[in-house]
Image: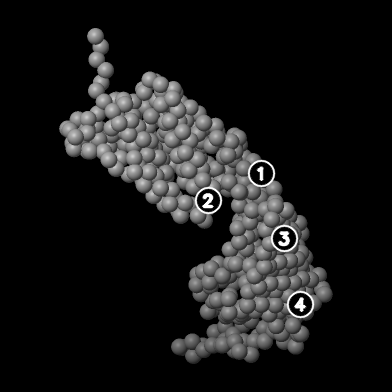
Amino acid sequence: MQPTLMARLIVMIMLLLGLTVPLVMIYSVVSERTSRRNEAAGTIGREWGGPQTLGGPVLTIPYRHAWRDPNGVMQERTDRLFVLPETLSIEGTVDPETRRRGLFEVVVYTGHLTVSGRFPKPDLSGVRPSPATVDWESATVDVGISDPRGIARRVSLSLNGRDAAARPGVTSNGLFSTGVRAPVGGLTADSEPLAFAFTLDLKGTSHLQFMPSGDETSVRLSSTWPHPSFFGAPHESVTDDSGFKAAWRVPYFGRGFSPRWTESDMRPEERQNQAQSSAFGVTLIRPVDIYVQTERAVKYAALFIVLTFVIAFLWEISGRVLVHPIQYAFVGFAMSIFYLLLLSLSEHVGFDRAYAVAAGATIGLVTWYWSGIVKGLGQGSLMGSALVTLYGFLYLLLRLEDYALLAGSVGLFIILAALMFMTRKVNWYNLRLAQPETRA
């Protein structure tokens, strides 16, 4: 191999390393725009309602118990018993819409939920220390709502057929810390199981999830949004262009926390972690998140610039043209700017159109420039065709969510095989590059 060829390879490697600087800068721009989008989502969430988690309901019964301290003096304290429902059923619809803050769109929703179920017959016989007195009149039913600002209208609970108006605030129970509560009224040790029902219009942003609070919890949702992402796999789900329908059924063993506990032994952090890890629901996702897609595209940038340089280098080893390192740099910069064009255009015209325009502009620019280097439109068109293939391959990778890794690895293997086939007879030891033109 001649030293000139080795020197050019070293220069190309240095150019590739240098091009990582603009690529890192472009990646930081994508991150900055993503942060601004998230800030816009947070602002809309503060006005509309943030991601919502519905917890409970929880029946809270205060009681007092006594004990004798080391000095022999009787002491008393107030404690609370928390009881979860035997059955919990939630049915509802989720009405989506998009809200805009500047250039940024955020998916919000209004959930119309009907909640019903039944608490077991109140029984404090197993509570230790044994209650001295039970404050039945102060018993409440607490409903956890992660962002109460999203409550769209007054909430009233039906408790054994009696309406009870809910008011803001909940008793600290270890499952949730915000929401509403309603007085039970008329509860005694001889009361029958407590049936409850209420409707809730809840506004939120993107996520709607539920804690499996019942010994058996069933949730059934429907919506016109055609792009749901379920977590906590539903046992039934149908998704099409008209929207989705989904149903979950979670038994007691899928919940991970006990059906009753007292304030003195609730261990709030542990219980909250168990409740959050068992929560399930749906996220209304956008079909194409331009920032996620652009970020994924930038991750392939260095590889695609390398492939373009390799294609250009094939012209050199074929003896057709001698490409100056500055010309390699211009091609690399043009391909780097593609990602900036993609991001800026997609905020205005959508990702697909932005990709077509940015890729078309970049391919056209490089093709025109390469035609001048090789002094022929036909040879320049070959470079354009190669770029069309590369950018088409990149678009395919961005569109294939589940099969992107498979498609990428197979595609790169095919590209490598093609390059190896084209250079299989090259004598790298005696290779001569094209000679630079000399002026008379």
Would you place residue 216 above or below residue 312 in this image? below
Residue 421 visible in the displayed image: yes
Q: Amino acid under label 2?
A: Leu
| Crowding at mark 2 (Cα within 10 Å: few <14, some 14-19, many 20+) | few
- Residue 320 at x, y = what percent? 31, 26
Residue at numbered disc 3? 222
The residue mark sitting in front, 4 or 1, is 1
- Residue 174 at x, y = what percent? 56, 71
- Between 344 and 178, the one lying in front of the other is 344
Pointer 2 or 1: first along the chain: 1
Q: Amino acid under label 1?
A: Arg
Pointer 4 or 2: first along the chain: 4
The residue mark sitting in front, 4 or 2, is 2
Pointer 3 or 4: first along the chain: 4
The reply, left or right, for residue 385 in relation to residue 228 is left
| Outermost residue toward the top in this view | 440
Residue at numbered disc 4? 195
Question: Mark 2 and 1 residues: CB-CB less than 8 Å, in contact?
Answer: no
Question: Mark 1 and 3 residues: CB-CB less than 8 Å, in contact?
Answer: no
Would you place residue 349 above or below residue 295 in this image? above
